[in-house]
Amino acid sequence: MKRFLWPLAIFLILVVFLGVGLTLNPREVPSPLVDKPAPSFTLARLHHPERSMSPSEMAGQVWLLNVWASWCVSCRQEHPLLVQFSKANVLPIVGLNYKDQRPDALKWLDDFGNPYSFSVMDTDGKVGIDYGVYGVPETFVIDRNGVIRYKQIGPITPDVLQNKLLPMIRKLQG
Amino acid sequence: MRIFLSIVFALLVVVGNDVARAVELKTPSKDEVLEDRLNTLSSELRCLVCQNQSLADSHADLAIDLKNQIREMMRQGRSDAEIKAYLTHRYGDFVLYRPPMKTSTWFLWIGPFVLLVVGIAALARAVRQRRRRLAEAVPEEVDTATRERARALLADDGPGAD
């Protein structure tokens, strides 16, 4: 009897490992930028290209940086939620319009609504690289001191908004 | 056919985190040494969009951007280590196909060797035990009556024989 216990134990360990592996999402790469200062940039605004914006201007408030593009299908999925959320005026949402064409981006916001306090244009995607963006849409929660506290990869769902983003935002604002 | 199409569609939805946009690769420079170096380095880096491809193989938008960025940094005279640090700072160790040796990856590097040693030890132990058992087994004394019976059985054409 005892000689079967070892193979059984090894089998069970393997089952646990594989079982845990199945519940992980390989597309979600933990960002090394969480709890680090948000990389600085200076980019032109989408609606007023003559005005620029850098993250340091947001110091003192908690804000969201949402990476979006008109060519991004998943952004369409999260957009209505973002528009609805922006009406509650919980915090400023800044859009990082990633590798987009200005007319396309403007039209997209006209068509689907504009949840952003303002958007900035990252036409060549350099700022995206600095933020480790690899799957648009992505959303960063940035605190009063300009430190990234959370990164959402992929669209924000009602569940993520209720159970992750909002509690975190309240804690950071409180 | 319909099932096939719906599977394809489902896959497209799952995979379709907007990877399909193609971007023109900046005309590769004439500098072959630099291109070789770029290829060697980027074949050791993982593309984050299509995760089972190296940066060198991938034609994803981001991969091309990153290769252009690496080319730029190489022209500025940055070392491979500096470029890797630049990428891991943004995307984490995940971009490296060869994970660095540190406390969290210790088991990954040492584990297989530990398993090998454990396996060899278990095998040696099993062999030794078996050998001892064989050595200790005393051949049973066979009395003449049994011997006779065996001979009779062997001589006799059994029911299975022709």
Image (cartoon, coloured by chain):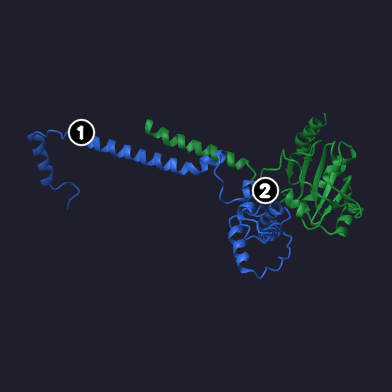
Chain colours: A green, B blue
A102 or B2: nearer the eye? A102
Where residue A158 sits in the image (x, y, percent)?
79, 39
Which residue bears the numbered disc 1? Answer: B136
Residue located at (81% from left, 31% from top): A170
Residue B98 in picture, x, y percent from top left: 56, 50
Furthest residue to the front? Answer: B77
Q: Is residue B124 visible?
A: yes
Helix, strand or loop under label 1: helix
Given residues B141 and A148, the one toward you in this image is: A148
> Where is residue A129 shown, x and y percent of the image?
73, 52
Amino acid carrying label 1: it is: Glu
Q: Nearer the viewer, mark 2 or mark 1?
A: 2
Chain name for mark 1: B
Position of residue A6 in the picture relative to residue A74 (left or right) = left
Asked whether A96 or B122 is in front, the reply is A96
**Residue identifier under label 2:** B91
Q: CA distance from mark 2 to mark 1?
A: 63 Å
> Looking at the image, is A164 positioned above or below residue B22?
above
| Residue under the point 48% across and 42% down | B110
